Image (tube, helix red, strand yellow):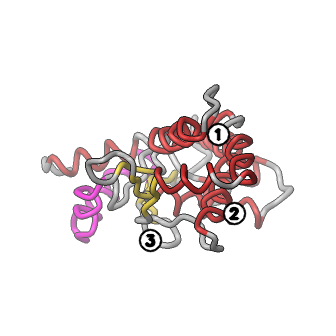
């Protein structure tokens, strides 16, 4: 074990289910970039039936279970999977809205900037986009009773900040930056698409689902 405060912060964040990326936890990612530090964290996690894993695009670090047969591990993963599945439709709708606003076929990637002002301007001037926003804010993840576009957009952005998908960028508070959690979500989406129709129990056996 190490008495380095970054070691403690890193393992605490990982065991707490945080997804570590340059945009939310730059100091911890820098710490993990050193092989010796990475080994120390891995060794500590292994003693708790956990291990380090990076997302497929290597944009973020997560904590995964080593052995799902241990007490509580399967239930923990099952609950996490259900939570992701419950929010997946809303998150996909958000991605589609962003792609329509940006008039492109590229989804949100870690590091991307999203301007709240641009979203409000584009959606307010396009009835079809306003309808997409209205539908989006009827979803549980983004639900709001506000009727005007600006407040609906703000509710969506604040929800994504709360869930760790965005951070505020700069001092104005109206520009946001995408985090590495999108990379993790895309891993999850790819797995779900590949294993469409299989039981939750089978899903839990795959390493992609073994997040703490």
44 drawn magenta: yes
Residue labelled with disc 1: 83
Q: CA distance from mark 3 to mark 1?
A: 23 Å
Q: Secondary structure at mark 2?
A: helix
Residue 49 lies left or right of residue 41; in this view the side is right
Residue lying at the far top in this picture: please name it. 145
Answer above or below: position of 41 versus 35.
Answer: above
- Of the numbered discs 3 and 1, the one sitting upstream in the chain is 3
Q: Residue at x 72, y 49 (%)?
A: 132
Residue 21 lies left or right of residue 1; in this view the side is right
Query: Answer yes or no: do the residues labelled 1 and 2 have beta carbons within 8 Å?
Result: no
Residue labelled with disc 2: 191
Residue lying at the far right in this picture: please name it. 197
- Of the numbered discs 2 and 3, the one sitting upstream in the chain is 3
Q: Residues within 10 Å of mark 2 (few under 14, many from 20)?
A: some
Foreground of the two, 168 or 29? 168
Foreground of the two, 65 or 114? 114
Task: Give the main secondary structure, helix, strand or loop, of the magenta stretch.
Answer: helix
Query: Answer yes or no: do the residues labelled 3 and 1 have beta carbons within 8 Å?
Result: no
130 drawn magenta: no
């Amino acid at each position: 074990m190490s008495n380095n405060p970054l070691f403690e912060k890193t393992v605490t964040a990982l065991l707490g289910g945080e997804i570590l990326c340059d945009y939310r936890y730059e100091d911890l990612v820098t710490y993990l970039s050193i092989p010796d530090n990475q080994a120390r964290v891995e060794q500590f996690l292994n003693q708790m039936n956990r291990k380090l894993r990076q997302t497929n695009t290597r944009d973020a670090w997560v904590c995964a279970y080593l052995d799902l047969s241990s007490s509580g591990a399967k239930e923990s993963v099952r609950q996490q999977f259900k939570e992701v599945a419950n929010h997946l439709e809303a998150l996909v709708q958000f991605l589609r809205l962003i792609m329509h606003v940006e008039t492109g076929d590229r989804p949100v990637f870690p590091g991307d900037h999203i301007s709240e002002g641009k979203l409000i301007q584009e959606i307010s001037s396009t009835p079809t986009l306003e309808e997409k926003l209205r539908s989006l804010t009827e979803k549980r993840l983004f639900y709001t009773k506000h009727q005007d576009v600006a407040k609906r957009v703000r509710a969506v952005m604040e929800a994504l900040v709360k869930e760790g998908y965005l951070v505020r960028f700069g001092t104005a508070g109206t520009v946001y930056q995408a985090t590495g959690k999108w990379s993790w979500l895309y891993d999850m989406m790819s797995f779900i698409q590949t294993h469409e129709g299989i039981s939750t129990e089978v899903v839990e056996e795959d390493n992609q689902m073994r997040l703490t």
